[in-house]
Image (spheres, helix red, strand yellow):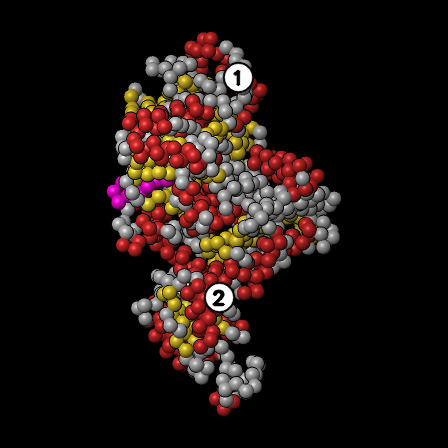
Amino acid sequence: MTDAEPQRAGQGGAQDAPQPPAYPAHWEADILLRDGGTARLRPIVPEDAERLLAFYERVSDQSKYFRFFAPYPRLSERDVRRFTHHDYVDRVGLAVLVQDEFVATVRYDRIDASGRPSGEGTEAEVAFLVQDDQQGRGIASVALEHIAAVARERGIRRFIAEVLPANRKMAQVFTDAGYTQRRSFAEGVLHFELDLEPTEQSLAVMRAREHRAEARSMQRLLAPGSVAVVGSGRNPAGVGRTLLRNLLSGGFTGALYAVNSAMKHGELDGVPVHPSVADIPGPVDLAVVAVPAGQVSGVVADCGRKGVRGLVVITAGYAETGIAGRERQRELVRQARAAGMRVLGPNAFGLLNTDPGVRLNASLDPLLPKRGPLGLFSQSGAIGAALLEAAHRRGLGISACVSAGNRADVSGNDLIQYFEEDEATQVALLYLESFGNPRKFSRLARRLAAVKPLVVVKGGRFARSVPAGHAHALTRIDDSTVDTLFQQAGVVRVDTITELYDTADLLAHQPLPAGERVAIVGNSDSLGLLTHDASLGAGLRPLAPQDLTTAATPEDFRLALHAAVDREDSDAVVAVVIPPIGVEGYPLFPGSGLMASEERYGSSFDTAPYAAMLVEASQHAAAAGKPLLVVHLAMPQLVDEINDALGDAGRVPGYPRPERAVRALTHSVRYAAWRRANAETGTVPEFPDIDTGSEDAARRQVASALGELRGRELTAEEAAQLLAHYGIRVLRALPAPDEESAVRAAAELGYPVALKATTERLRHRPDLGSVRLDLVNETALRRSHREMTATLGPEPGLVVQPMAARGVDTTVSAAVDPAIGAILSFGLSGAPSELLGDVAHRLVPATDAEVSSLVREVKAAPLLFGWRGAAPVDTDALEEVLLRVSRLVDDLPEVAELTLEPVVVAPAGVAVLGASIRLARLPARTDLGPRVLS
């Protein structure tokens, strides 16, 4: 590649003169590589001269030839100066570092139309050099994302690159990047032109690479070939010794080492002891750190030199202790990532993997759970322990469990990536107390939920409190909105650990229901009615309960359950089972005619026939693709007998109360409906009148309006102008402070007109007389102006506006939450949205399918579709307005708030009567830029 070969280095002349550029610290980033390792990416500075020379010495002659198209064994002083001195505008160089040493460099040089170095133009030559033993780790791909983002920031729109045909790896990097590109071959060289504007394909490529890298980084933590417990002491009750013992008792299949700086040799619990990680003779994949906080930095440095791949830091005393601890935590992450390691913790409970080939229990839990389909992630150690204990008590199997503590590095987003790839995990369960990157969480959750259920307990539902130690951005939106966003992403949100496992048990072991029709069969009329009522209250469609009476035999149950499964109008079956009253081991209720006779049942009740019947019924239901649930009263052993009989063939979830069963079934029904709807997610439509020209004009208007301000409200005229760039026309309104102004405005706009007040206290308050409609002439207008001026008080802010067609008044709005991202909202104007909170939300960018469901989701939606004989209104036109607003807010991140009210939806067309827009310099949307570890 020839963008900056040494023989051309002098062509820039004065361009190479020393400059005093400001160092762009915001370009620095921790990056995750294809194999799950980490590296540091940052701008190259003059002080990097020695690093550059050492790096160049490690690069093979072939790689140098591919870079410079000629043998070039060493760099001259002039070369070193050129490659380490940049203006960070027209000439930029970035380096990728591991262990504070260069392993790759990438640079661009701005060029003019003739291909010569220039301070103007929108094109630049780009070139890479990657150390040979680091090739294949995806370094060039992620470096291209970052150098492209830098170039776009500096006004460069296209990269030019030349590659020798033999350099197939580099050619593949450009080919696979997903950017719009042109490729040609001339004079023995491949010529690439890459347009740097992100495309759907480039974003998809970036996110696919991110997914693979993050899943792989978790695989490195959860399936190590060797583990060292640093801080294993002589005290059997110590944390380090406990961790060592748990690894041993769990049957870890890899090499296990104990590290104790006070012991030069010997053993602990039969495990060899070494004074440091560096002294361990073999490789170490995972280090579990349980030393005082003051010693952790030295341990991390030791692990980095050893080539350890990941750290589990059990040690506390970090961000949860205050400002000083928070800085120690940041330094811990910086140090570990620079050495290529991910960090679980600090203040972590640990991690477990039940894979028979691994059997890893690097946690404080003494028991390795049995193997099963549930993957667990918890931000709390106490909750993590409770989740494991509850799973053991209920006989549920776990595939893997990670409890992250302060979540300084590894987060729930990483585990979502891993659970999607892990074949052993059929249902992912998360306990979350805060979001690190909620926008990314929503995207990842949606992708996972499309193939596996994701069930979440979210702490802080009301207080919005976040535990000490968690990096977070507090969200301003209501928790009901978070619920809506979870639903949009397919996340099953539950309130308690009990509900978490009730739901997970059903989702993991029974088919998803095809609908919401529920058949109820049982031997208790009362319990059947309670199940029926709970189903109705949850929004399901229960059939009339079938009461077999307490005299029902197992054969009666079997026949009834088969019939319920075979019904065409049932989607799920609930079996309600109680023991015969009066049998030994069960309560006696004197005077009850329901007591079973001893001649029929004997002196004790044998549940085995009932268990066998339910096993057979569950197999029949599974064959029909319908879930079967059991509600049992005072019969805890029944479910155990069923599942012991089924073994690995399946499991029937049992519930001691009908409302718990119905709640779990409701989650399953809604999730199944989301899966079906998500199969056709729709598209983000393109509008022919929104082109590059209109987008650029909108960006220029926003930049001009903001200037140096942190934020400001646009005037009505400015808001209308900005909306017009996206094809949204706001009905013109002219000020009418006095009668004569009103008359002139009406003459300009044309009768009939409306006269309305616009001050904050009167806006959208027709109940206060703030609007007069259908004023057909000057006389009516003057009279209305006098009356409104007299009754509304000083400065009502009167305006004259043309009359719009009659219809339904609605409100369309969008807001950017710093944690969640951009949110599109819709409701009917007035009491439905303002008083009753009847508003629906979607994440931006919204698809046509999402906008269609958004309009229909509000409770007042029937008013749009011909309620009580009224004419239906033009919802197609309404949906187009919503999609255009979504596009505007997605394109212009400075639009912090946007409201269109009212949007009058008529039988034919819509009219936007009012608009307000607030601009603000909001934090960058990190989920849309190049891949970084947050």
Q: Secondary structure at mark 2?
A: helix
Q: How many marks?
A: 2
**Image quadrant containing the N terminus:** top left
Residue for point 32% across, 71% down: 567
Q: Position of residue 856 (x, y in %)?
A: 35, 50
- Displayed quadrant of residue 560: bottom left
Q: Which mark lies nearer to you, 1 or 2?
A: 2
Q: Residue at x 40, y 29 (%)?
A: 716
Residue 88 place in picture, x, y as percent: 49, 20
Q: Provide the residue designation for mark 1.
A: 21
Q: Which residue is mark 2?
A: 659
Q: In the image, what residue occupies the spot 48% across and 89% down?
A: 600
Asked if residue 200 can be seen in this view, the reply is no
Residue at x-position 37% and y-position 51%? 860
Label 2, residues with CA under 10 Å away: few <14, some 14-19, many ≥20: some
Q: CA distance from mark 1 to mark 2?
A: 66 Å
Part of the protein shown in magenta: 902-909
Toward the viewer: 801 or 177?
A: 801
Question: Which of the numbered marks, if any, corresponds to residue 576?
Answer: none
Residue in front for this viewpoint, 859 or 98: 859
Where residue 548 appears, as percent x and y from the top left, is 41, 80
Name the residue type under label 1. Pro
Q: Which badge, 1 or 2, is on the more N-terminal residue?
A: 1
Along the horizontal axis of the image, is 293 left or right of 856? right
Would residue 14 be seen by someone viewing this image from the given angle?
Answer: yes
Q: Position of residue 96 (x, y in %)?
A: 51, 29
Dot 2 amino acid type: Glu
Residue 665 lies, with reference to residue 469, above or below; the image says: below
- In this view, the residue in front, 184 or 781, is 781
